[in-house]
Image (cartoon, rainbow, N blue to C red):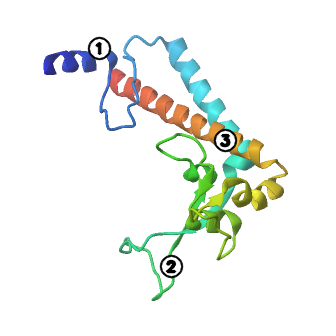
Amino acid sequence: MEAMFSELGKETGIKNFAEETLIIPKTGALSAEEFHNLEGELAGFTDVLKSDPVASYRLNIEQSSHPLKSGQVSKRNVPLKKQVDLTAFISIREGSFPAELNEKQAQALMGIAHPMLNARGKVDACWALDRISKELGLEWEVLIKQIENIAKIKKQIKELKMRLDLYRSEIS
């Protein structure tokens, strides 16, 4: 059984199942034209993300109380903040934007300290995205679809970069 999986790994070019189970086909057979097409596709995706206002929208969220990394300075009892884009709220399990958000997520999206929670201790996504959707001039349903599309584009960019890097390493 183990030999079968090692053969499968050789055939498909799978480097590591832990890398989000991305399957990278063998790249040694890429022609120069295919390689340039992949580079063009990568450039197109990155241009789309650069020009999209939803993709460039950033929020400041509080980091958990992990020890400070080197170079980070924080005064006592002052929480560290980091900037994230809207795809950070996509559920890893479901691969989509959640219908309900927890209190910390809602605080970051709504920009208020104490959002109104429902009986389950959650905030509906439509309420949490209301401020941002107004800022961007989009309905909240359209905003959620756009956030999910951006996440898919980011995944495609990651796959393309991995494939191009693998090809570059094989030819050098």
Badge number at residue 11: 1
Q: Quadrant of residue 48?
A: top right
Query: Which residue does the numbered mark 2 point to in the structure image?
Result: 79
Secondary structure at numbered mark 1: helix
Dot 2 and dot 3 residues touching (CB under 8 Å): no
Q: How far apart are the two marked residues, 1 and 3, measured between alpha carbons?
A: 33 Å
Q: Position of residue 147 (x, y in %)?
A: 66, 44
The disc, 2 or 3, on the residue closer to the chain's N-terminal end is: 3
Q: Where is residue 44? Give x, y as percent.
A: 66, 30
Question: Which residue is found at the position 72% from the left and 48% from the top?
Answer: 54
Q: Nearer the viewer, residue 92 or 18?
A: 92
167 to 34, vertically: above or below: below
- Residue topped by disc 3: 49
Which element carries disc 2, helix, strand or loop? Answer: loop
Q: Could you say which is closer to the camera, residue 22 or residue 140?
A: 140
Marks 1/2 in contact by CB < 8 Å: the verdict is: no
